[in-house]
Image (tube, helix red, strand yellow):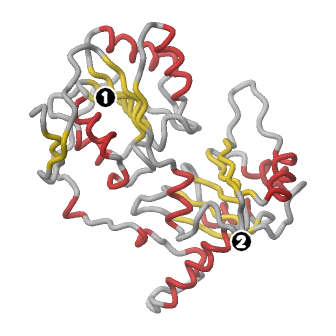
Amino acid sequence: MNDQLFVRPDNTSLPSAAAPSVGSCTLVGAGPGDPDLLTIAAARAIQQATVLLVDDLVNDAVLEWAAPSARIVHVGKRGGCQSTPQAFIQRLMLQEVQSGEQVVRLKGGDPFIFGRGGEEVEFLRAHGVSPRIINGVTAGLAAVTSLGAPLTHRDHAQGVVFITGHAKPGGAGPDWAQLAQTAHSARLTLVIYMGVAGANSITQGLLRGLPGDTPVAIVQHASLPQQRQAITTLTELPATMAREQLGSPSIIVVGDIVHCAALAAQAERSVDPQQGGDPALHNTSSFYDYDSEALPTRAPRRAAQP
């Protein structure tokens, strides 16, 4: 690889830092799924890696940035499925760095937003390794943006809370009633990650502090062509998810900001009379430019197994 040029799959170039000569580790956010949302810094790190440890939700198209000689190891972690143990992943990261590899730990979204990046950084630092962090577009932001709505708005929301709907095993989950009361009084948008399995209990908790007609959006596979979503109310959240068969991975957005998403859906429908059905339940992937001709076409590489 030319040390002076950063070469994209489409053969355009940008300045690049020289590759390091000793073992290193970089935690890279791969974004919500759409490979076009990858940052330049992330793409450069992927291109320079000799070993990539890849989470389950990372789009295969992102791996087209990897060098042909790079070793790719899938260390999938997804709720409700068999996963690679976190302790094993951390030991593998350290082992590869100590072997002199340029390691990229590739995570969906952002490493420091429900990506266990904090745990991995603490482990590496405890063993004398100082990792680099490259942020990615988190799914909570991409999900709302794909609906044509902001997370904050002076007329609707003065802040936003990113919160997990899946507690650590043996740990206590969020106090949904208290959170709902705070969100109601402070006009906050709630963005709930990993909340599908607990949607019923989350709803019951939130109803203790938020009105039943509070608007809610559920977005599955945010930013990808197969994205699906529904707009409903807090009271109807579990029933809507069941009726529309919205499962993981999904983002649940609660708050008045969802009104903006409904208005955006109606506006899009007004300029596209060919679309039928409920404007709150149509696919809005047209907010993204999915130009298949612009995507890399390298044949899939067989991945190493942990």
The quarter holding residue 60 reads top left
Mark 2, Cα crowd under 10 Å, few <14 / some 14-19 / many 20+, is few
Dot 1 crowding, Cα within 10 Å, few <14, some 14–19, many 20+: many
Residue 109 relative to residue 97: left or right = right
Front residue of 162 and 21: 21
Q: Residue 52 bears which disc, if any?
A: 1
Side of 175 relative to 241 (left or right) = right
Q: Which residue is label 2 attached to?
A: 155
Quadrant in the picture for residue 72:
top left
Viewer-nearest of labels 1 and 2? Answer: 2
Rendered residue at 68%/53% (across/down): 160
Residue 146 position, x and y percent, is 49, 65
Instruction: Say which mark, if any, is on residue 179.
Output: none
In this view, the residue farthest toward the left is: 2
Identity of the residue drawn at 51% across and 9% down = 126
Front one among 277 and 167? 167
Question: Is disc 2 placed on a helix, strand or loop?
Answer: loop
Query: Along the line of sight, which residue is nearer the eye, 231 or 109?
Result: 109
Q: Residue at x 38, y 34 (%)?
A: 106
Which image quarter is the N terminus in? top left
